[in-house]
Amino acid sequence: MIASVALGVWKRSRTALCLLALTCATSQMAAAAGCPGHPDALGTSRTLVVDPREHPRIGTMQYAETLPLADHEVVLTFDDGPLPKYSNQVLAILAEQCVKATFFIIGRQANANPEGVRKVVDAGHTVGTHSQNHPLTFQKMSIEQAKQEVDQGIASTLAALNGDKSKLAPFFRIPGLLRADAVEQYLASQGIQNWSADFPADDWRHVSPSRVYDLAIQRLEAKGKGILLLHDIQPRTVAALPRILHELKARGYRIVHVVPATAERPATPTDPQQWQLHPPSETVAISRWPKIPNFVVAERSMLPAPRLSHLDWQNSELSHGVRRPRAIPLPPQALWPLPSLSGQTTAANALPAPAANVFKIPEGVRVTLLATNSPVKRTEQMAAAPRAAEKVAGAISARSWVAATPSRHAAHQVPTSRGGHGARGAAKHAAAPSKPNGRAVRVASLKKR
Ligand SMILES: [Zn+2]
């Protein structure tokens, strides 16, 4: 029975995989068909329109969200250009494969090579910016400096595009991915989408083109889809790129071109969970763990703190002057077994008996008796702490309520006075009224119940 069910599931899974492979192959063929003169090209499978205001930070290298890509979809990005010597070669390689990418331009490079920026746009790629001078200090510079870097980079790139804002995407990548809260907030306030990445290929390091290729493919395979970070100013990238694109096609990957939403071009409809790299799914192992019930608290941005009364605190409403949010009452008992306090749990699972000196009352205690007629007997605790018991028993004799004056330095300890009264001192003060700041306490541990 189980075997036949498993066989059925396997057959359905295989059918689904075949359909998926067929879809991928069809998509690839369609993409290649749109590349005249290059029938074997990788091509660009689709265009994704995004609204930066809805998703201001993307790229799982740093953020919770990334582009809403399907499995085996890849977005290519190139930073730090344009640098004609290498950027032009990258453009030629992409053109040969009819692949569209996103370029993050450095303002200073745009000033030096404005024609290079126009070439990128004219080839149909998306152009974003990457600061004016590419300082690797965004994480620690002042926000005024950061704003200047961002704004000047945009102004320089726009100048290269003759001020045509329609040719510049509100996409920005922080140099070195050295993010800072203030920078992210500024970008979001300007409606600029902050692009991290899903994986780099380390092509800015002193590694071989073969290593760049290996890292690009390995890291893509590890995630199954995502934004690849490359640099169009590096000779090793130029050398590795043809092989990377060829391998992407061989492995069934598809290229997605990303453009910003405009009034005439609305964002591609997506579900929020698509912006997660691997949204929870019934087909992945992690979703098989028990899911958290949909309590009302699940809709809150912050989980409520337990009431302090649940912790047996005296003031249940205020702590440090801050009113806690309303909390859902906790169950009276833990729903899981309590761990043993030590490795030597007794059969009765009992707590260890308190040490005798727990009940010790130090020298110099000042005890003032209040009038009462309740008799007090010696207890086991008193027997266990003979010295303290002697003193207190002599002082309280037939009375059970005492008023003890707390120490000025140790409110949590048994109170002592400056004079160092012992049991006789306590008896001496038996009839004296308690001081105004004295706290009446019941010597519960001394009274046998
Ligand atoms: Zn860079």
Image (cartoon, rainbow, N blue to C red):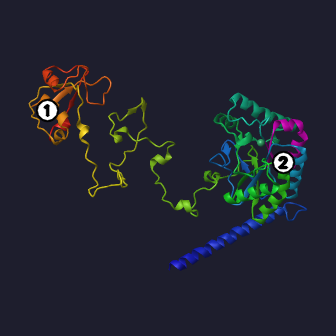
Q: Position of residue 4 (x, y in %)?
A: 54, 79
Residue at 48 percent across and 59 percent down: it is 290
Q: Quadrant of residue 359?
A: top left
Quadrant location, ligand no. 1: top right
Question: Which mark's residue is nearer the viewer, 2 or 1?
Answer: 1
Could you say which disc has been placed on residue 234 in the image? 2
In the depicted view, which residue is nearer to us: 132 or 213?
213
Mark 2 closeness class: few <14, some 14–19, many ≥20 residues within 10 Å: many
393 or 244: nearer the eye? 393
Residue stretch rendered in magenta on the structure: 102-128
Some atom of ligand 1 lies within 8 Å of the CB belonging to the residue at label 2: no
Label 1 sits on residue: 393
The residue positioned 13% from the left and 21% from the top of the image is 428
The quarter of the displayed image where residue 411 is located: top left
In the picture shown, does residue 244 fall above or below 418?
Answer: below
Going by the numbered disc 1, the residue's amino acid type is Ala
* Magenta residue check for 103: yes
Q: Amino acid at mark 2?
A: Gln
Q: Position of residue 138 (x, y in %)?
A: 71, 35
Q: Is residue 241 magenta?
A: no
> Quarter of the image containing the C terminus?
top left
Q: Is residue 399 visible?
A: no
